[in-house]
Amino acid sequence: SRISHSHLGNWLPHLGFLEVQDKTWGGLQGIQALLSAVAMVVPETLPALRRHYLRIVTSLLLLAVPATLAAVKTAGPPACGKPQHLNRIVGGEDSTDAEWPWLVSIQKNGTHHCAGSLLTNRWVVTAAHCFKGHPNKPALFSVLLGAWQLGNPGPRSQEVGIAWVKLHPVYSWKKGARADIALVHLEHAIQFSERILPICLPDSTVHLLPDTNCWVAGWGSIHDGVPLPNPQTLQKLKVPIIDSAVCSRLYWRGAGQGAITEDMLCAGYLEGKRDACLGDSGGPLMCQVERTWLLAGVISWGEGCAERNRPGVYISLAAHRSWVQKIVQGVQLRGHSQGSGPTGRRGRALGARRARRAARGRGV
């Protein structure tokens, strides 16, 4: 029988193939959805009409598929540090779903152990101490991506095994936390989505000044010894950067034994009550520069959880940027545009004012 415009008008709106996979045809999944929709809409009692529709749709798809697959093949990785969905850490609050799409849970024997940050579709960065005692046993660990609630990760999350772990060569858990950073190579490439995206590393134009507000997020304990209750919703907390000299004095061991090394930075509240805690280790310290989120640091250590004059200590990604770049192909760097931020004229003046205020008001 002949296909009329009225027939098309009756069933075409029900197909919904334009809504498949990020509101595109969605490659092969979109094609499958379209053919299934045609089969459902055209009743079996009209086999000739069904065959006719399917022939037309198949012909159209044969024209579209090469272009679709070529686009998928040539498409680069998504832009780093830009969540597509923006709508307990101690003293923290629930995050929103997909607010931090690069944050991952590193699981040990199926239980949350540490956090980490996605750099590319094959690499995660975390803290080296997360693998203390097991650096050569990747089979014990896996990485959960795209989860908001660990108690209910949902069908759009992905869990991937770990192929191997690269600890920083300087790191030694017996000698302190210097270079407490590790790169995790996944068993296979993950699929990016609005829930799973990479974060950027800061480039050489980024210099975090005291009192710069950044964020931490994780599924760690909400108090010292008090785990995050079910459904284990991802927590977030805004933390200001603390002047390195102030932090060094706070953690001074005496006799030349300063605990804060040149590759560390501190953030948090000197009065305590709010901080990262057990289980947040390896997670990100995230700072926004020109509307892009940068991985400023990796959660490393602190004394207690949210104790007075004991802020969180982070391993600086700026200090280890070249090491990461040597190993991780495709990691993306971002920073300030020319003439803006801390390296531009206005930024230097602002930095000088902040430094003077810090010197006056941050004596310990």
Image (tube, helix red, strand yellow):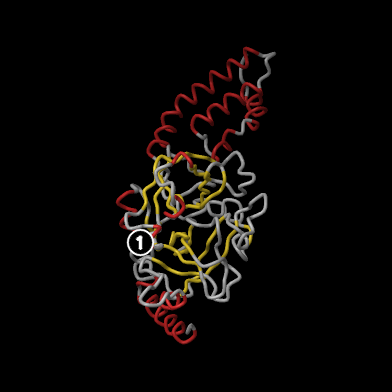
Query: In the image, residue 1 lies at what x, y percent?
Result: 62, 13
Residue 16 appears in which quarter of the rendering?
A: top right
Q: Is residue 212 above or below residue 198?
A: below
In the rendered image, residue 301, in percent from the top left (x then y), is placed at: 48, 63
Q: Along the line of sight, which residue is nearer the eye, 325 or 140?
A: 140
207 or 218, which is in the foreground? 218
Q: Residue at x 54, y 38 (%)?
A: 21
| Residue at (67% x, 53% y) in the render | 229
Q: Position of residue 12 (x, y in %)?
A: 62, 29
Q: Residue sitting at 48 percent across and 60 percent down?
A: 299
Query: What amino acid type is highlighted by mark number 1?
Result: Asp
Q: Position of residue 320 (x, y in %)?
A: 34, 59
The residue drawn where x is 37% and y is 38% is 74
88 on left or right of 286? right
Residue 204, placed above or below residue 234: below
Judging depth in this view, the residue of 231 and 333 nearest the camera is 231
Q: Which residue is mark 1?
A: 203
